[in-house]
Image (spheres, rainbow, N blue to C red):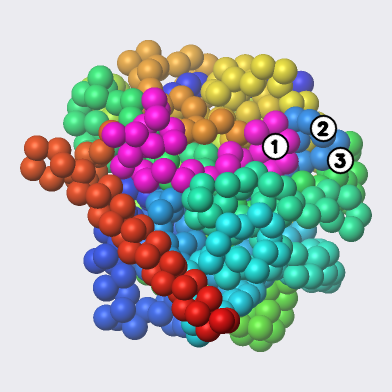
Amino acid sequence: MQSCHLSRRKLPARRAERTLATVGTLSLVTAAALTGLAPGTGSASSHREAPLIAGDPKADNTDVYAFTSPDKPDTVTLVANWIPFEEPNGGPNFYPFANDARYTIKIDGDGDGKPDTTYTWKFTDHIRDDENQFLYNTGVVKSLNDETLNFRQTYDLTVTDAAGNTKTLLNDAPAAPSNVGKASMPDYAALRKQAVVPLPNGGQTYAGQASDPFFLDLRVFDLLYGGNLSETGHNTLAGYNVNTIAIQVPKKDVALKGDATRNPVIGVWSTTDRQGANVIGAGSKGSENAQAEDSKATDEGAPDKGGESGGWRQVSRLGNPLVNEVVVPLKYKDAFNGLTPDKDNTVTPVVDKVKDPIVPKLVQSIYGIPAPATPRNDLVEIFLTGICKECGPIKADLNSQKLNADADKAKFVPAEELRLNMSVPPAAKPNRLGVLGKDLAGFPNGRRLNDDVVDIELQALEGAAQTGKLVPALAAGDRVDAPYRQPGDTFPYVALPNTAAVNQADALHPDGGVGAGFGGTAFGDGFPVVPVMAVGGGALLACAGVLALRRRRIGDV
């Protein structure tokens, strides 16, 4: 395969979503309540970069990953995460998946912007004692079936083809619980292993908690580090968890016509759907028309290629990282998250912002680095068409569905998807900069858990794909170059969830330390208010648990 030249380093940070959401959660939730935006009806929101998403974190899709499995190269692994900023000590309810939503991972093999394969997870809650207990667990949990696990979830997994035919793969499969802590779950790795479930015709799936694999310094939103790149290097997401859904399947299961040799390129994205919910705030004729067409089809019960019917509405969507965060203007964020990829090219104001992005202008105004000339057809190729010689100015064949032998090019449309060429073998020595680092197995050819997408996309936005060279002034990026916890070597690859309070965790003390004070958690001369309050709350919960156990023992006498 011909080498492809992009370029290196960091993009005003992706989990933008996350910081803005954390700071604004209370106000946004209040606004949602006052305006009647209940998560299950009326209007809803999507990924946390959109104005309303903080009101529905269980539906908030944070990241999508797609890569050839390094230990099983005849399979592909797809990973999607939800619920950003899960503080490990977030009891007593912790972080269940929504039981009134559908979580999906969708695959487009022919490039028409519609899913040819859709995997759907639907969760069910199970509570052993909701009348006499408030605890998530009442004792040490050693297995997913322990009586001490008071709250647990199972899920049904289905697969839907392009014609809307649906087949059930799993019924009542166990999800891993939130990691309550070392006292309650001393061997969480064993619990997670029990939650890795084999699929009927090969492959496996997992649903449960994980350490957030995304990494960046979110102070990027303080006027791009306050105009001082030396003040970077703090991983804002260190210590937080997310809810993960992962699936590993033979490549033929997702390739066009089941032939991964002739048709190795797939487009991947993930969504959350709620019944009766709809995303508003489009503000453009193109997006309004696209939503009207989609709503009409759904209301009439006519399935699209992903099997949508019965009044379900897409309220969260994610393919490539950072697109809605730093490319799509505020006015169109909610509407973009409600659209299907085949409609993307109809929303002119959004396409215009891909061709003439905001970020390079900000970098120029703050750091004096000239913005590349427009229109940015190189970005159209990276985000909307995939990279191929006939797709645009990046003269290399890499990951466009136009490369699939059986794809009908007449039906191809520009669509925002994370594209992966499954024929590229896993790298023996992965480079965090992916294609920019001459590693064709990394982003933007799919996305691995260690790919530094913030550094990569910033360089791409600054024109590195046009020149094949890094922008020297931004070569150091945000100096956050790896996830807080390293991924594993086997499925589901994501790292085990954290247990330390976030404001006690740092790179030198990943299991907790004395480094309180970040994010306004210290008081006066540095007294760690939040850690002390967490300890106090933990003590109250412990006492309550002891009292409950004593009452039970007395009643048994």
Disc number lying in front (3 or 2): 2
In the rendering, at what x and y percent does residue 121 appear?
68, 65
SS for callout 1: strand
> Residue 313, can we see it?
no
Q: Earlier in the sequence, mark 3 or mark 2?
A: 2
Measured in 3D between alpha carbons, the distance from the residue under mark 3 to the one under mark 1, in whole angstroms, is 14 Å
Residue underneath mark 2: 73
Residue 452 as seen in the image, left or right of residue 159: left
| Measured Cα–Cα span from mark 3 to mark 2 | 12 Å
Question: Which portion, as a residue range, is magenta?
Answer: 488-514
Name the residue tied to disc 3: 260
Name the residue: 72% across, 41% down.
Answer: 491
Q: Is residue 222 visible?
A: yes
Tell me: 223 left or right of 484: left
Say whether marks 1 and 2 touch (CB < 8 Å).
no
Decide which of tag 1 and tag 2 comes sooner along the chain. 1
Taking 75 as reference, is 542 above or below it?
below
Q: Which mark is residue 67?
A: 1
Element carrying mark 2: loop
Q: Residues within 10 Å of mark 3 (few under 14, many from 20)?
A: many
Regarding mark 3 in the picture, which secondary structure is present there?
loop
